[in-house]
Image (spheres, rainbow, N blue to C red):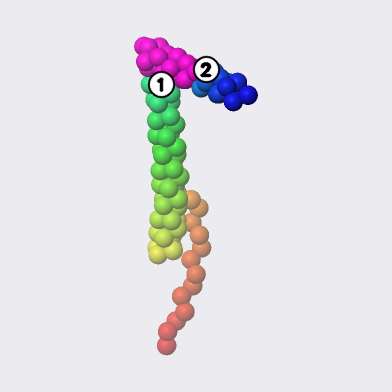
Amino acid sequence: MKRVFWLGVGVVAGVALSRKATETARQATPAGLASNLGDAVRELAGAVGSFGAEVRAGMSEREQELHDMVEDRTGMPAPRADGRHAAPRPRRARRAEG
């Protein structure tokens, strides 16, 4: 019974090692290298795209903060991204000091 067990373990190990060696050899071929390179480039492109989207979102958020700050400090609406001004907000009347 022990010999049959060890024979089974040896067969399974042999098949696993054979498959692993075949896969490694396939990856070393020009087609396998091109596939790995293509996957790496796609992953890099996705990461760059995500970074760009985050930067644009941050820029838009900061631009809105700056527009709000200009409006609060000057009372005048800041120009929009298309170069036009928003409708002016009415100014509050100042109290007379006396």
Magenta span has 43?
A: no
Q: Position of residue 80 (x, y in %)?
A: 44, 47
Mark 2 closeness class: few <14, some 14–19, many ≥20 residues within 10 Å: few
- Does residue 52 appear in this view? yes
Res 27 → quadrant: top left
Eye-nearest disc, 2 or 1: 2
Which residue is located at x 40 percent, y 64 percent? 73
Q: In this view, does 69 lie above or below 49?
A: below
Which residue is located at x 49 percent, y 72 percent? 93
Q: Where is residue 85 in the image (x, y as percent from the top left)?
A: 45, 49
Q: In the structure shown, which secondary structural element does the residue marked by tag 2 occupy?
A: helix
Number of numbered discs on residues: 2
Q: In this view, does 52 lie above or below 29?
A: below
Q: Residue tagged by mark 2?
A: 15
- Amino acid type at mark 1: Asn
User: 58 and 37: which one is in front?
Assistant: 37
- In 3D space, how far apart are the residues under numbered discs 2 and 1 (Cα atoms)? 25 Å
Q: Is residue 96 above or below residue 83?
A: below
Which residue is located at x 40 percent, y 63 percent? 74
Q: Residue tagged by mark 1?
A: 36
User: Outermost residue toward the top?
Assistant: 30
Q: In the structure shown, which secondary structural element does the residue marked by tag 1 occupy?
A: helix
Tags 2 and 1 touching, CB below 8 Å? no
User: Outermost residue toward the bottom?
Assistant: 98
User: 10 and 45: which one is in front?
Assistant: 10
Q: Main secondary structure of the magenta part?
A: helix
Mark 1 closeness class: few <14, some 14–19, many ≥20 residues within 10 Å: few
Magenta span has 33?
A: yes
Q: What stretch is highlighted in magenta?
A: 14-35
